[in-house]
Image: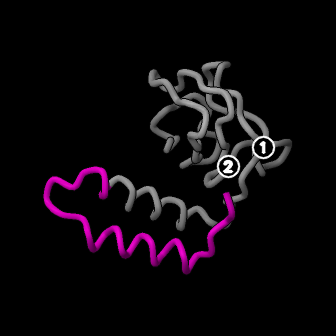
Amino acid sequence: MSAKTDAELTAAADVIAAETTAGGNTKTRVANLLKDMIDSKPNNPVRGNYDASTNLFPEVGGTGSSGVVLRGNQFPVTVGGTLGGEFRPAGSILFALDDQPAQDASKWRVI
């Protein structure tokens, strides 16, 4: 997966938002997800592959001091597992929505 520029992400979010219709919940979720990605761009580096079979969200390996997970850090899931009560298969991506999100599922976005 190649990194997208801010302009590319903004254009994609605009297209999705324009196509969103009443009852278009999936499109709304994707548009919101893109917005979160754009907003968190300063700390947006993709971190190493993540083995979710531990059934825990990442708490280390982020861009913060001593590897602390920061808002915008992304972790591609390479081995599926249950995170926040839901199974997340390989290929999912975990996005930290807050600094030091720990095991609070509301502080993570998963696609």
Between residue 53 and residue 109, name the one nearer to us: 53
Q: Which mark is residue 70?
A: 2
Mark 2 vs mark 1, CA separation in Å: 14 Å
Residue shown at 49% from the left, 44% from the top: 111
Q: Assess whether residue 7 is covered by the magenta stretch.
A: yes
Please check the rendered image and state whether residue 20 is part of the magenta-colored stretch, yes or no: yes
Residue sitting at x 41%, y 70%: 13
- Disc 2 marks a residue whose amino acid type is Leu
Q: Camera-side residue: 56 or 107?
A: 56
Element under disc 2: loop
- Mark toward the viewer: 2 or 1: 1
Front one among 91 and 103: 91
In-image side of 63 versus 43 (left or right): right
Q: Amino acid at mark 1?
A: Gly
Disc ID at residue 48: 1
Q: In the figure, 3 relative to 57: above or below? A: below
